[in-house]
Amino acid sequence: MDKLIADAKAEGMLTTIALPHDWCGYGELIASFKAKYGIRVNELNPDAGSADEIEAIKANRNNKGPQAPDVIDVGLSFGPSAKKEGLLQPYKVATWNTIPDDAKDPEGYWYGDYYGVLAFQVNTDIIKQVPTDWADLLKPAYKNAVALAGDPRTSNQAIQAVYAAGLALGGNDPAKAGEAGLKFFGDMNKAGNFVPVIGKAASLAQGATPIIIRWDYNALSDRDTLKGNPKVEVVVPKSGVVAGVYVQAISAFAPHPNAAKLWTEHLYSDEGQIAWLKGYCHPIRFNDLAKNKKIPADLMAKLPPAEAYEKAAFPTLEQQAAAKEVITKRWDAVVGANVK
């Protein structure tokens, strides 16, 4: 580490891209990196998407100037494809062994940095008996109550929700999760419990969709924004806990490769992982931190119980693609609810 720090300081700068300060605690992470190492951070296009980040690497492969990103933070599918195109360089951080195997490239070209899991966001002013697992959502108590946070024919978040329900109710078999999830939502629709409206904080507060299935970090953030009006509880189901992952990687053409490696060490340190958690994005090393009691008690108190995340499944790209194919094409035929 001493040599890496010295080499990074000699480079003097790190160029990031697509890191808004209000996303996942990145404001604190950037500030603490600058304060700790005295390295300037050149922040490109904070509002860029994953595809924009990949294009920035391609466009600047022969450019060592300030428009060339050193590091990227992208959706899971972009990691393997960028590796295949020769756009990334391998690097394994000191805490490599505590990153789950199913959330990293074995050669170190990309690795999960944080994730969300599908959870139930519940307006407890209306719903007095809070559901704890997927099967509960079929109970008569939840008539006209349950919504998705997107249209499962087009929204990845909604597709993953159907997949998660199917994983819980289909014997934990990823190959059957798509069909099992469709059957579950079909049964929910027939029971009159499913509301074909895209659930948002406003519809939750108004009572139109008092239960929304969505990423936990969005639900937890809404809880803070609503400030108890209404009261919101965020529940990670007992089964079918499915994680959606972002991944971190270093450009193969990074102008500041040592600063990039040092930044990555910063992100995967205990301090960096906890900074992500403050932004309600579960750091990839969450289970390791929780097991070793390294997460501050006041932060843990704001989150669902740590054990709720221990069963989190990280679907492979192949599993996601197979489920998407089934769910998007057969939603209308099996469930018959026009979500909008």
Image (cartoon, rainbow, N blue to C red):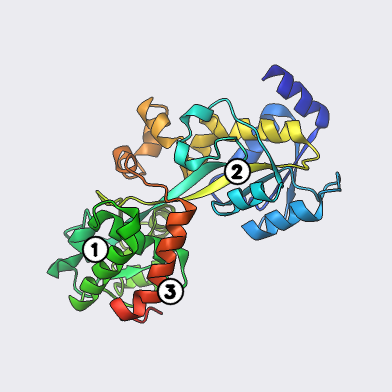
Earlier residue among tags 1 and 2: 1
Mark 3: secondary structure:
loop
Dot 1 corresponds to which residue? 125
Q: Is residue 131 left or right of residue 92?
A: left
Dot 3 corresponds to which residue? 153
Q: Is residue 28 above or below residue 156?
A: above
The crowd level at tag 3 (other Cα within 10 Å; few <14, some 14-19, many 20+) is some
Q: Residue furthest left?
A: 140
The mark closer to the camera, 3 or 1, is 3
Dot 1 amino acid type: Asp
**Number of residue marks:** 3
The crowd level at tag 1 (other Cα within 10 Å; few <14, some 14-19, many 20+) is some
Q: Do the residues labelled 2 and 3 touch (CB within 8 Å)?
A: no
Name the residue located 65 percent from the left edge and 59 percent from the top edge.
51
Q: Are marks 1 and 2 in contact (CB under 8 Å)?
A: no
Q: Which quadrant holds residue 29?
A: top right
Name the quarter where the C terminus is drawn.
bottom left
Earlier residue among tags 3 and 1: 1
The reply to whether residue 111 is visible in this rendering is yes
Q: Which quadrant holds residue 293?
A: top left
The reply to whether residue 231 is visible in this rendering is no
Dot 3 amino acid type: Arg
Q: How far apart are marks 3 and 1 (CA)?
A: 31 Å
Name the residue located 35 percent from the left edge and 75 percent from the top edge.
331
Residue 39 screen position, x and y as percent: 75, 33
Mark 2: secondary structure:
strand
Name the residue located 30 percent from the left edge and 41 percent from the top edge.
305
Q: Distance between the residues labelled 1 and 2?
A: 40 Å
Q: Is residue 16 above or below residue 38?
A: below
The label shown at residue 248 is: 2
Dot 2 amino acid type: Gln
